[in-house]
């Protein structure tokens, strides 16, 4: 089977960031499928590279998380136009596997189905246009109406749909009741990320002590609410705690967060440049807790964040700031603590108690690793995807799917 995988922001483990598409595409290749990836890059000309058996087409469409709204829209439109032109030139595939965000990648699927009679599976990573509407990035009522109609058309015309969390999957069923919907969450790389004791040489490298450490590794955008972690760091410093805080990432809010940290004179906080997955693993190896946060909007409760699944594989206890799917998994499986709005004092007290109970803290870390291995290892995700693509050839696995649907 020949598949063209469309992901505007494809990244490899060496580049860091969200590498879901790399692992899924490689899983297809390992299963005997021929896979080509269409993505974008900041180079000035079209380029092709072979990466671990995946033929990757890099279209010259610049994009950066720091782009403003209209510059982002321009990049989305340009990618769609160039991808369509490329699809006319390369050999016809059996199937398109298209992932969002942005939702505009769905234009490619609608066009390919109509013009080239190529079916497509559409994967929904975040709920568009609901997320930018709730954030306030899209306010024009005509734009909202158009995007909601586009969303419905994309879902209804897809061969099947893939959601990354139970909340996303439920939304897909509501918008397109007759569509076949599958759940394939983000996943844990249990080979790259493993539980480790704090390494003395690494502690020295980052000028850290062997004290309770909380790390955030991910995007630094408006919706990530990392300022709440700075609030916790400030409170800890005021109360004389020896706790340490690490932030590794990049995004539009990076400079603002650094200004806040400077204003609050946070001596217990370090910013670390964005890095590869191996560098993320290095930072997590020094942490006791992984901080998982989002802005307090209903749509963001459906998220399936990569950083959470990396932390599970690394055997880290979890601190979560919102009552979404991650909160439910954390609570049900004894992975850590919540830091919900309006409950900072209570949560701080719980964290103090946990600091003085190393046996309980160690159990939380073990629970995280166990959950990663049992339900969220990348091999499970690949197996689910292969079953979606070719259900006759690849056997069904249901026990883990039932679990994550009801978590």
Image: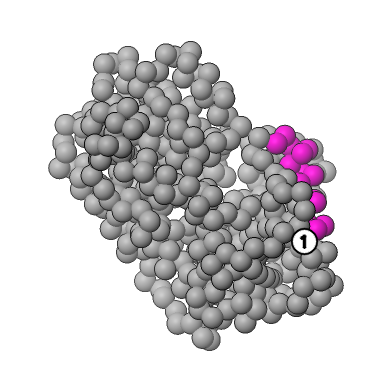
The picture places residue 148, in percent across and down from the top left corner, at: 74, 52
Q: Nearer the viewer, residue 75 or 34?
A: 34
Residue found at x 71% / y 67%: 156
Image quadrant assignment for residue 132: top right
**Which element carries disc 1, helix, strand or loop?**
helix
Image quadrant assignment for residue 404: bottom left
The picture places residue 117, in percent across and down from the top left corner, at: 79, 77
Magenta highlight on residue 52: no
Residue range (magenta): 67-83
In the rendered image, which residue does mark 1 sit on?
Answer: 83
Q: Is residue 110 visible?
A: no
Q: Nearer the viewer, residue 81 or 353?
A: 81
Task: Give the dominant element type of the magenta stretch: helix, strand or loop.
Answer: helix
How many numbered dots are placed on residues in this image? 1
Q: Is residue 374 above or below residue 104?
A: below
Q: Nearer the viewer, residue 183 or 177?
A: 183
Q: Nearer the viewer, residue 307 or 167?
A: 307
> For mark 1, does the 10 Å Cα neighbourhood hold few (<14), some (14 to 19), or many (20 or more) residues?
many
| Residue extending furthest toward the bottom | 392
Q: Is residue 288 visible?
A: yes
Quadrant for the C terminus, please: bottom left
Quadrant for the N terminus, please: bottom right
Residue found at x 53% / y 86%: 392
Image quadrant assignment for residue 197: top left
The picture places residue 308, in percent across and down from the top left corner, at: 42, 48
Q: Is residue 101 above or below residue 405?
A: above
Residue found at x 41% / y 27%: 270
Query: What colour scheme was applied to this rendering of the protein?
Result: one colour
The picture places residue 226, in percent across and down from the top left corner, at: 48, 31
Residue found at x 57% / y 29%: 253
Query: Relative to 47, is 389 on the left or the right?
Result: left
């Amino acid at each position: 089977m020949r598949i063209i995988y469309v992901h505007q922001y494809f990244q490899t483990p060496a580049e860091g960031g969200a590498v879901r598409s790399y692992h899924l595409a490689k899983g297809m290749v390992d299963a005997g499928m021929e896979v080509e990836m269409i993505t974008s890059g900041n180079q000035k000309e079209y380029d092709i590279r072979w990466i671990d058996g995946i033929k990757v087409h890099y279209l010259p469409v610049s994009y950066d998380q720091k782009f403003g709204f209209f510059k982002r829209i321009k990049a989305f439109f340009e990618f769609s136009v160039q991808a369509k032109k490329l699809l006319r030139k390369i050999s016809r595939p059996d199937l398109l596997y298209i992932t969002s965000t942005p939702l505009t990648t769905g234009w490619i699927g609608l066009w390919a189905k109509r013009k080239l009679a190529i079916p497509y599976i559409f994967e929904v990573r975040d709920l568009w246009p609901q997320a930018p509407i709730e954030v306030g990035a899209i306010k024009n009522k005509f734009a909202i109406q158009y995007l909601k109609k586009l969303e419905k058309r994309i879902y209804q015309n897809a061969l099947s749909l893939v959601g990354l969390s139970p909340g996303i999957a439920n939304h897909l069923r509501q918008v397109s009741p007759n569509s076949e919907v599958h759940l394939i969450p983000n996943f844990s790389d249990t080979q790259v990320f493993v539980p480790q004791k704090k390494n003395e040489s690494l502690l020295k490298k980052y000028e850290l002590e062997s004290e309770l450490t909380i790390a955030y590794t991910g995007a630094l955008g408006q919706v990530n609410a990392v300022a709440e972690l700075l609030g916790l760091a400030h409170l800890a410093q005021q109360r004389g705690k020896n706790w340490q805080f690490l932030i590794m990432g990049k995004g539009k809010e990076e400079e603002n967060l650094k200004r806040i940290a400077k204003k609050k004179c946070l001596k217990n906080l370090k910013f670390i440049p964005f890095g590869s997955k191996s560098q993320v693993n290095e930072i997590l190896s020094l942490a006791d807790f992984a901080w998982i946060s989002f802005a307090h909007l209903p749509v963001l409760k459906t998220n399936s964040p990569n950083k959470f699944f990396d932390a599970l594989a690394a055997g880290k206890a979890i601190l979560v700031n919102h009552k979404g799917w991650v909160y439910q998994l954390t609570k049900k499986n004894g992975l850590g603590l919540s830091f919900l709005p309006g409950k900072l004092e209570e949560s701080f007290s719980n964290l103090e108690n946990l600091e003085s109970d190393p046996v309980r803290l160690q159990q939380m870390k073990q629970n995280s690793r166990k959950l990663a291995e049992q339900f969220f290892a990348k091999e499970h995700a690949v197996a689910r995807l292969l079953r979606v693509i070719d259900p006759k050839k690849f056997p069904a696995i249901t026990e883990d799917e039932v679990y994550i649907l009801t978590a």
